[in-house]
Amino acid sequence: MTATLGTSHLADTPFVATLRAHSRRYHDQHPLHVRMNTGLCSPRQIRGWIANRYYYQENIPRKDAAILSNCPDVEVRRRWIRRITDHDGPAPGDGAPVEGGIEAWLRLAEAAGLTRDEVVDHRHLVPGVRFAVDAYVNFTRTRPWVEAVASSLTELFAPDLMAERITAFERYYPWIEPAGLTYFRNRLHQAPRDCEHALEIVTQHCLTVESQAAAVDALSFKCDVLWSLMDAIDKAYEE
Ligand code: AHQ
């Protein structure tokens, strides 16, 4: 059993370098994120992004449950299942009443002037966002579980974006109550922890040219999911 040393010891293999190179296609470079993080979005655009991203957030646990349902490895399931409670929160009475990510995202919505109802009932959800998210969930249900794990590796690039977003929101969108940013602060430590596990799984299981190519394709697909999600929101809220 190789000791888990974080992902730094994996940095130098050509396979991991190819995975990491997908940072060039990560949605932090999407024009909507660039405008958002330089203070150029209107309140209507920020609210539209929050309301539509809710559909992504509420589907993360279902995506992770799909991976669990296809994964035969108890050790992997023991760690992967944490992702579900990170988003759903613990059952009442099952320990500290820490709010899950879905609830934190609803608080972000309220902090930005949206009502919970108008987010939860999807009245603002645009077709392209639904299709991108549903494509992601269906990918994790139907592809081999290691490929589905590989598709989550976009989170290798998430911490920098979360830090940039928190700074931008505090600086350019002070009308959003600061407490609403809790979700992003939580991702600063959850994302590195999660993608370290995902990278361990992918590097331990993808030992052939074919399996490594499939993992790279899975990550490329997920970059397209995130990019087209932003395309749909950008188009729907262009001013
Ligand atoms: O809030 C995000 C989140 O919980 C996840 C889970 C992970 C996955 O398993 O696909 N990806 C992801 C992401 C979250 N937030 C996105 C953002 O820009 O706020 C980034 C996204 C990702 O990088 O895949």
Image (cartoon, grey):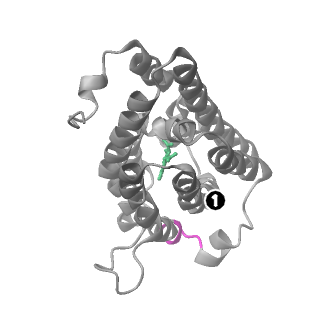
Mark 1 closeness class: few <14, some 14–19, many ≥20 residues within 10 Å = many
Q: Is the N terminus in the top left, top right, bottom left or bottom right quadrant?
A: top left
Q: Which residue sits at x=50%, y=41%?
A: 149
Q: Nearer the viewer, residue 114 or 129?
A: 129
Tag count: 1
**Residue designated by label 1:** 55
SS of the residue at dot 1? helix
Q: Is mark 1 within 8 Å of ligand 1?
A: no
Observer-nearest of 42 and 75:
75
61 versus 34 height, above or below: below
Q: Is residue 201 magenta?
A: no
**Where residue 236 appears, x then y in whole percent?**
75, 48
- Residue 121, position in %: x, y? 70, 73
Quadrant holding the C terminus: top right
Residue 125: horizontal and vertical position, in percent? 73, 59
Please name whichever residue, 8 or 186, is drawn nearer the observer in this view of the structure: 8
Q: Residue at x 63, y 35 (%)?
A: 227
In this view, 86 is above or below 40? below
Q: Mark 1 belongs to which amino acid?
A: Tyr
| One can see residue 24 in this view | yes
- Magenta residues span 109-114
